[in-house]
Image (cartoon, rainbow, N blue to C red):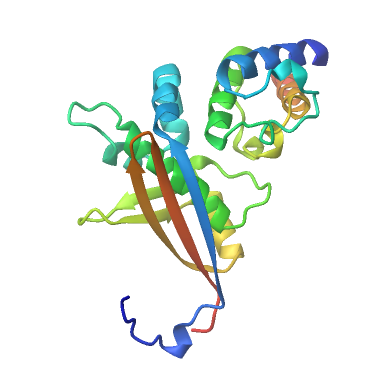
Amino acid sequence: MSADTSTAIREVVREHVRLPVDIDTLSDDADLFAAGMTSHASVNLMLALEDAFDLEFPDRMLTRSVFESVGAITAAIDELSMQNSDVA
Amino acid sequence: MTNLAPRNEQSVPAAITVGLDLASVEAVEASIDRHDERYLHRVYTPRELSDCRNGDGTPNARRLAARFAAKEATMKALRTADEPLPWQSIGVRSDGFGRPAIELSGRAQELASARGVRALEVSLTHEGRYAAAVVVAELGGAR
């Protein structure tokens, strides 16, 4: 699931975060804030990810590190998706 | 230069920290257009939303951008590392004279207490496409 998740996250970043570089030139570990994502853009990213993956980031995940790279976001979404499937 | 009255030695703070942030009014407008109430209610306190309405009831993006900058400036002044901090736990309220003040709740309030913050001062501005905020935190010190 993580590879598909990573691809989908890149699409969301491309559409909702105005990075000065193409997201596909960045590795999964690349720091999105260092690449030009503002803190306000990270709010848009969070809301857009919630729409795209039909989930909600809980308060405990509202940290800089959760949104700082495609890899970190993938891990967070995988964790939330697993929790949701456990509940369902 | 204003001559300040000498401070009572007992009220001298141990230290101050400062946070500064700049926010794009256009980015706030875009977020309102795209995410509407979800964006507004996830980021701003009910008081901020009430204080930042245009005459027709629509959200005032310039004033909201200044408040977003104040939240980020407060996080910087609190020297946050990677603690989870909901944006709504930091708010700006205006007094009867329009003077802004920082209002903390929940996790932000706990963090400020843990940091020994005695007081927070904020100044907001907006001009054209940008809004900015400066927050000064007064830490510890003998009373």
* Residue, far left: B55
Residue B44 falls in image quadrant: top left
Residue pictured at 24% horizontal, 53% vertical: B98
Q: Can you see residue A88? A: no
Compare residues A15 and A59 and report the one nearer the observer: A15
Compared with B100, B28 (above or below) is: above
Compared with B79, A81 (above or below) is: above
Which image quarter is the C terminus of chain A in? Answer: top right
Query: Is residue B52 toward the left or the right of residue A69 in the image?
Result: left
Residue A15 appears at what percent x and percent y? 58, 14
Compared with B104, B15 (above or below) is: below
Residue B104 appears at what percent x and percent y? 46, 53
Residue pictured at 72% horizontal, 26% vertical: A73
Compared with B123, B115 (above or below) is: below
Residue pictured at 57% horizontal, 69% vertical: B116
Which image quarter is the N terminus of chain A in? Answer: top right
Residue B6 appears at what percent x and percent y? 38, 87
Compare residues B82 and B76 and report the one nearer the observer: B76
Residue pictured at 52% horizontal, 34% vertical: A40
Residue B27 falls in image quadrant: top left
Residue B11 appears at what percent x and percent y? 45, 83
Please tell me how many numbered marks the rendered image carries. Answer: 0
Q: Can you see residue B8? A: yes
Compare residues B44 and B19 and report the one nearer the observer: B19
